[in-house]
Amino acid sequence: MTDSSSISAVKTLLHAVLRRGHELISCEVTTRGRRHYEVHVVPVSDMSTAVVESFDKVAKAVRRHAELSWLLRESGWEPMPADEPVHPATAA
């Protein structure tokens, strides 16, 4: 049995969705508590190809998110406005 006090809820610290044509990709920073940060890059049309990188400092995770976002923009991906709905079914 798992002690529920040892399980930390995942919290999203930073999230961006980028679009290129009909493709969508999600790039986010999450935390499960102090010293556990992750950067997730998830193609919405094929979540099985998601990439997750772990960091022990929030600054490193945020820096990596910024680097990946920049690389995606340089490759033709455009940030979606925060108020624009994401419809994964139409992303393929």
Image: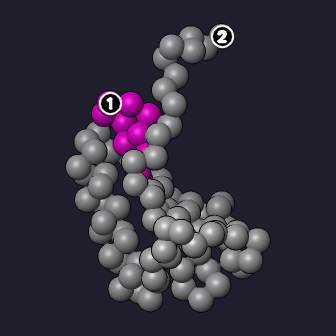
Highlighted magenta segment, given as a residue range: 29-39
The location of residue 40, given as percent across then percent down, is: 47, 56
Q: Nearer the viewer, residue 74 or 14?
A: 14
The three-letter code of the residue at mark 2 reads: Met
Q: Nearer the viewer, residue 13 or 35?
A: 13
Residue highlighted by disc 1: 34
Residue highlighted by disc 2: 1
Instruction: Locate residue 50 relative to residue 76 in the image: left or right.
Output: right
Few, some or many C-alpha atoms within 10 Å of disc 1 (few <14, some 14-19, many ≥20)?
Answer: few
* Residue 76 is at least partly visible in this image: yes
Q: Residue at x 39, y 82 (%)?
A: 73
Of marks 2 and 1, the one in the foreground: 1
Q: Which quadrant of the figure contains the C terminus?
A: bottom right
The three-letter code of the residue at mark 1 reads: Arg
Q: Residue at x 25, y 51 (%)?
A: 60
Q: Is residue 30 magenta?
A: yes
* Residue 38 is at least partly visible in this image: no
What predominant SS class does the magenta segment belong to? strand
The location of residue 15, given as percent across then percent down, is: 45, 58
Q: Which of the two discs, 2 and 1, labels the residue nearer the N terminus?
A: 2
Q: Residue 1 is drawn in which quadrant?
A: top right
Q: Nearer the viewer, residue 48 or 30?
A: 30
Q: Is residue 80 magenta?
A: no
Determine the residue located farthest toward the right in the rendered image: 89
For numbered disc 1, what is the local secondary structure? Answer: loop
The location of residue 25, given as percent across then percent down, is: 55, 71
Instruction: Locate residue 72 relative to residue 57 in the image: left or right.
Output: right
Q: Residue at x 63, y 69 (%)?
A: 86
The location of residue 14, given as percent across then percent down, is: 40, 54
Tell me how far mark 2 sits from mark 1, CA to CA.
24 Å
Few, some or many C-alpha atoms within 10 Å of disc 2 (few <14, some 14-19, many ≥20)?
Answer: few
- The colour style of the image is one colour
